[in-house]
Image: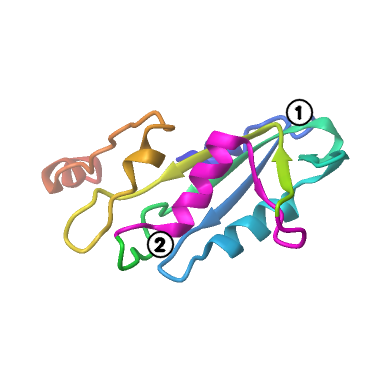
Amino acid sequence: MIKSYMNKYDSEVRLSKCMNFSSASTPGMFQAAIESYVEKRMGTTFGPPSGKKMTVFIDDINMPIINEWGDQITNEIVRQLMENKGFYNLEKPGDFINIDDILLIGAMIHPGGGRNDIPQRLKRHFSIFNCTLPSNNSIDQVYL
């Protein structure tokens, strides 16, 4: 649903990228992916190519593993990007990389039954929409 909507973007104005999280996703993988989508603009400021805007869709945002302290560290760097508009440079410790003109969208299945929820500190940055699955009876009537 979200990918089909993003395919309708005017590519002259807005770019779209998709990534899937899993239990093997790490903060470094997320940061490297975002850095590969942007180019240097000025100083320590980066953004999508040619002054465009970019939407990044993160599917299964609730999948990263929870560590022994109860944190999803991969989602902490997502939160840092949303709150601080960037993250720290891994090659030059102490330098902060500013990321402009990027919008993050996430999707996940309901938590429970072994599926994680995302941290409240991250959840507060999203508008939440609940799309429930139709009942079997409804599905049967669609295909009759």
Q: What residue type is labelled 2?
A: Pro
The residues colored magenta run 70-93
Please tell me which residue lies in front, 100 or 68: 68
Q: Say whether residue 85 is left or right of residue 136.
A: right
Numbered disc in front, either 2 or 1: 2
Q: Name the residue under label 1.
A: 13
| Residue 55 position by quadrant | top right
Residue lying furthest left = 137
Q: In which quarter of the image is the C terminus?
A: top left
- Determine whether the residue tagged by mark 2 lies in a helix, strand or loop: loop
- Which residue is pictured at 71% across the width and 33% down the height? 100
- Determine whether the residue tagged by mark 1 lies in a helix, strand or loop: loop
Spot occupied by residue 122 in the image (x, y as percentages of width and height): 41, 41
Q: Mark 2 points at which residue?
A: 64
Q: Which of marks 2 and 1 is nearer the N terminus?
A: 1
Spot occupied by residue 140 in the image (x, y as percentages of width and height): 17, 47
- Which residue is pictured at 45% across the width and 40% down the height? 1
Q: Say whether residue 59 is left or right of residue 94.
A: left
- Which residue is pictured at 54% across the width and 37% down the height? 82
